[in-house]
């Protein structure tokens, strides 16, 4: 990066109320600055204290301080399926089951795997989805050229490298967190420049790492990175600059282990060590900001980011805005959210598919493409290549799914990998039990409870299986906004059109006009965004 103009920020004491914490690095530049910062971060000067906790479960409660969203959920930088808290730590499972601690700079790069204090340093230990973490393994970060796997919505991807200078399999985080991870890596190779870094291994296979040394016994001094990795990380840090999430995390970690990440306190500090300003002396209280960097730190989104593209889009408190003809659906994870008369769609999030219309010739439900975001989606329904909405009914202790478009109930009437239809909610095979396991809906047929509704990704379809296929999730239609027209009047049903959905004032689906006006209690309802009264 070129340096044309420089902004100068002066403090009576250092930034972010750091006082004279960085004073020992004053006047240093390049490699000398990196070494001076190492001494500061490790508490070698004055009465500074650097004290990491032991790695085990002692660290877990701290993530409520360092990595929680405003919705009091784990802030996962690898996956959009973050419906868990610090209590949901697990060692393995499918995406969305829980989280575990991720050494963003893999522990196998430390030489001895459990080398302290690197092994327990919170600055590079992020809480992330356990399944995605397993897939990341000790892969280096880099741009993926040929993808072989991904988390939901391609938020994180992995596959063969597309980054010049590195070959083999790599892991590419989402654009929204590439800068966060670059600044984390700058911290690690600075704080631990006196430590040994080695080649990563995965069983018998040696994998590429990003640090400059490749054999034990060599110190990770300067520059600390392989050339390709340094070039990439500098680009990531420039393109994805600081947000309030990093600033707040820096403060929280400092309270726990009593040191800081200078690459967060001083935006663009990497330019002084590796980039365009290696010939400029660092000043802790009169800092010159490299061109293109800023101290105007934006608020981060209260979830996994707000970038378009592979990111998750709106967060859970900011639902998608439906276009004309679309409705908003949200994932449910509890039987308390099962409501008679409400509309639901059945989704396989892992494969970005939803259950569509019934194929009467094959006795299957067709799959249609549907990408959800943070457990929400806006979509049209009941059309070719769109999800079909099911109206939930209750029969005793069981449930029914009514396809109002085809005027049939979803059923399973034979012991085969099929799905069928019947015309009565009390017919054999028309009733289901619904339970939840994490984010997944377990929908079993009461005629033969060994069969459950699942998705087959090999032969794309939604049918009933006894074997383990892809799990499904249940999405519930969200209430419509209160209509602008407030006049209450009789409304001729014939004007509504066939299969128009009828809502109550809370936005619950009460039926359709498929066979004229359904039997409704006296009250006020909504058809075609107009209020009607049933007397």
Image: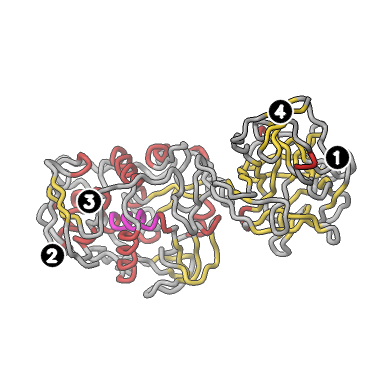
Query: Mark 1–mark 3 contact, CB under 8 Å?
Result: no
Q: Element at badge 3?
A: loop
Front position in the image: 256 or 356: 356
Q: Is residue 494 above or below residue 417?
A: above
Q: Which residue is mark 2?
A: 279
- The residues bearing labels 4 and 1 have C-alpha atoms spaced at a distance of 26 Å
- The residues bearing labels 4 and 2 have C-alpha atoms spaced at a distance of 75 Å
Q: Which residue is mark 4?
A: 524
Front position in the image: 157 or 53: 157
Q: Nearer the viewer, mark 1 or mark 3?
A: 1
Q: Element at badge 2?
A: loop
Name the image quarter holding residue 141: bottom left
Binning the other alpha carbons within 10 Å of mark 1 as few (below 14), some (14 to 19) or many (20 upward) gives many
Q: Which residue is mark 3?
A: 266
Q: Element at badge 1?
A: loop
N-terminal of the pair, mark 2 or mark 3, is 3
Q: Which residue is mark 1?
A: 425
Query: Mark 4–mark 2 contact, CB under 8 Å?
Result: no
- The residues bearing labels 2 and 1 have C-alpha atoms spaced at a distance of 78 Å
N-terminal of the pair, mark 3 or mark 4, is 3
N-terminal of the pair, mark 1 or mark 3, is 3
Residue at 13%, 65% in the rendered image: 279
Would residue 164 appear left or right of 421 to someone viewing this image? left
Front position in the image: 166 or 475: 475
N-terminal of the pair, mark 4 or mark 2, is 2
In the rendered image, residue 456 lying in the magenta stretch gets the answer no
| Stretch in magenta | 177-187
Q: Position of residue 177 (x, y in %)?
A: 40, 54
N-terminal of the pair, mark 2 or mark 1, is 2
Binning the other alpha carbons within 10 Å of mark 4 as few (below 14), some (14 to 19) or many (20 upward) gives some
């Amino acid at each position: 990066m070129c340096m044309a103009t420089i902004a100068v920020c002066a403090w009576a004491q250092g930034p972010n109320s750091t006082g004279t914490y960085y004073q020992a690095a004053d006047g240093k530049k390049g490699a000398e600055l990196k070494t001076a910062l190492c001494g500061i971060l490790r508490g070698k000067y004055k009465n500074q204290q650097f004290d990491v906790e032991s790695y085990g479960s002692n660290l877990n409660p701290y993530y409520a301080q360092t990595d929680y969203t405003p919705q009091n959920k784990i802030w996962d930088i690898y996956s959009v399926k973050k419906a868990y808290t610090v209590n949901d730590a697990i060692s393995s499972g499918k995406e969305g089951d829980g989280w575990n601690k991720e050494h963003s700079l893999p522990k196998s790069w430390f030489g001895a795997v459990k080398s302290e204090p690197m092994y327990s340093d919170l600055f590079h230990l992020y809480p992330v989805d356990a399944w995605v973490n397993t897939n990341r393994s000790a892969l280096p970060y880099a741009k993926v050229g040929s993808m072989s796997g991904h988390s939901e919505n391609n938020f994180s991807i992995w596959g063969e490298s597309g980054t010049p200078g590195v070959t083999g399999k790599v892991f590419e985080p989402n654009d929204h967190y590439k800068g966060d991870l670059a600044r984390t890596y700058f911290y690690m190779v600075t704080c631990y420049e006196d430590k040994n870094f080695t080649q990563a291994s995965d069983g018998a296979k040696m994998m590429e790492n990003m640090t400059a040394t490749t054999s034990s016994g060599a110190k990770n001094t300067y520059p600390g990175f392989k050339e390709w990795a340094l070039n990439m990380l500098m680009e990531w840090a420039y393109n994805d600059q600081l947000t309030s999430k990093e600033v707040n995390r820096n403060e929280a970690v400092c309270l726990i282990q009593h040191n800081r990440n200078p690459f967060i306190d001083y935006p663009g500090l990497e330019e002084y060590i590796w980039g365009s300003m290696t010939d400029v002396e660092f000043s802790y209280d009169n800092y010159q900001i490299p061109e293109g960097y800023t101290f105007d730190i934006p608020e981060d989104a209260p979830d996994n980011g707000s970038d378009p593209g592979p990111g998750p889009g709106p967060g859970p408190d900011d639902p998608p805005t439906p276009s004309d003809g679309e409705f908003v659906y949200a994932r449910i994870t509890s039987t308390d959210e099962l409501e008679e008369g409400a509309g639901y769609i059945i989704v396989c999030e892992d494969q970005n598919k939803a259950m569509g219309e019934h194929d009467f010739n094959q006795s299957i439900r067709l799959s249609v493409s549907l990408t959800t975001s943070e457990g929400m989606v806006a979509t049209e329904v009941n059309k070719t290549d769109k999800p079909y909405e099911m109206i939930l009914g209750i029969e005793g202790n069981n449930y029914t799914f009514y396809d109002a478009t085809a005027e049939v109930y979803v059923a399973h009437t034979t012991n085969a990998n099929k799905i069928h239809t019947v015309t009565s909610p009390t017919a054999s095979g028309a009733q289901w039990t619904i339970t939840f396991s994490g984010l997944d809906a377990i929908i079993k047929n009461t005629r033969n409870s060994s069969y459950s509704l699942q998705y087959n990704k090999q032969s794309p379809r939604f049918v009933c299986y006894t074997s383990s296929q892809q799990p499904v999730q249940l999405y519930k239609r969200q209430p419509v906004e209160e209509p602008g027209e407030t006049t209450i009047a009789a409304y001729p049903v014939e004007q509504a059109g066939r299969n128009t959905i009828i809502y109550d004032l809370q936005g619950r689906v009460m039926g359709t006009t498929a066979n004229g006006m359904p039997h409704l209690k006296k009250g006020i309802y909504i058809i075609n965004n107009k209020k009607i009264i049933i007397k």
